């Protein structure tokens, strides 16, 4: 069973700090990874995708991928209370024609003013 | 703006009364997905269409059916809703199997 693992949290950081969210995966051949943000009662919103080893930055968000260690992370700089949400790490299942997303359990982030 | 639209946003139905949820997309994506999400759980894939090819997950109950009459639209039919089917139903689209999936706003289904 291919898996994506996240710490469920909650992760609490003060406003203005860096929030670090981590994810590991079991399928060494996985090629693409996505981070979704989900507010309570809302649908998942794609905030970052990463396909290559290294870092990818978009505004306050940086995704990091280390394929050798099978590790994906999301850093949120200058965290704001509006960043408080559940963050889902996901990767498409390579064995599935349509690319079924394998989700981690989600990490709940709380940013305290 | 290109987007994924779901209707209705909230649906209340009675136990055993059929219900249809709809999804449309302006992204012209090949793949459309239906997920079920219950409180504090990750989304669970029910089925997907890759173009016209329908793919059912092995553990999706027979009570759930889907139709994709054209590239833009996809429907989820629940033939006889039970109390356990109360959930958020999410439609998502993607260019292809390894690409990002974009979710619609979801339909919150309540079964009374």
Image (cartoon, coloured by chain):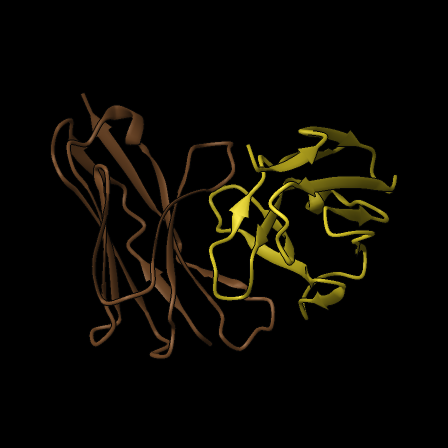
Identify the residue at image location x=31%, y=57%.
A6
Residue A99 drawn at (x, y percent): 54, 66
Rendering quarter of residue B49 = bottom right
Q: Is residue A111 left or right of residue B101?
A: left
Considering only vertical position in the picture, is B98 above or below B20?
below
Q: Is residue A82 left or right of residue B68?
A: left
Residue B98 drawn at (x, y percent): 48, 65
Q: Is residue A101 left or right of residue A74?
A: right
Shown in brown, the chain is A
Identify the residue at image location x=80%, y=48%.
B78
> Which residue occupies the foreground of this view, B95 or B41?
B95
Q: Is residue B43 left or right of residue A80?
A: right
Count of all numbered marks drawn on residues in the image: 0
Residue B55 drawn at (x, y percent): 70, 67
Q: Quadrant of the C terminus of chain A?
A: top left
Residue B29 drawn at (x, y percent): 61, 53
Considering only vertical position in the picture, is A96 above or below B86?
below
Shown in yellow, the chain is B
């Amino acid at each position: 069973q291919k898996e994506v693992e996240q710490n469920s949290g909650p992760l609490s950081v003060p406003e203005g700090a860096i929030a670090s969210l981590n994810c590991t995966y079991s399928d060494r051949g996985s090629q693409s990874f996505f981070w979704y943000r989900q507010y309570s009662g809302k649908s998942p919103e794609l905030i970052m995708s990463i396909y290559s080893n290294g870092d990818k930055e978009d505004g306050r968000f940086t995704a990091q991928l280390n394929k050798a260690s099978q590790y994906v992370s999301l850093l949120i700089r200058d965290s704001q209370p509006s960043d408080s949400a559940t963050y889902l790490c996901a990767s498409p299942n390579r064995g599935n024609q349509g690319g079924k997303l394998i989700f981690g359990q989600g990490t709940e982030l709380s940013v305290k003013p | 703006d290109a987007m994924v639209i779901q209707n209705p946003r909230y649906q209340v139905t009675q136990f055993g009364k059929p219900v249809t949820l709809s999804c449309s997309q302006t992204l012209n994506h090949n793949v459309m997905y239906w997920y079920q999400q219950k409180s504090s759980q990750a989304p669970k894939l029910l089925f997907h269409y890759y173009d016209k090819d329908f793919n059912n997950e092995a553990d999706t109950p027979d009570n759930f059916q889907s139709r994709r009459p054209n590239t833009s639209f996809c429907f989820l039919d629940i033939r006889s809703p039970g109390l356990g089917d109360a959930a958020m139903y999410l439609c998502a689209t993607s260019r292809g199997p390894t690409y990002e999936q974009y979710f619609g706003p979801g339909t919150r289904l309540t079964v009374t």
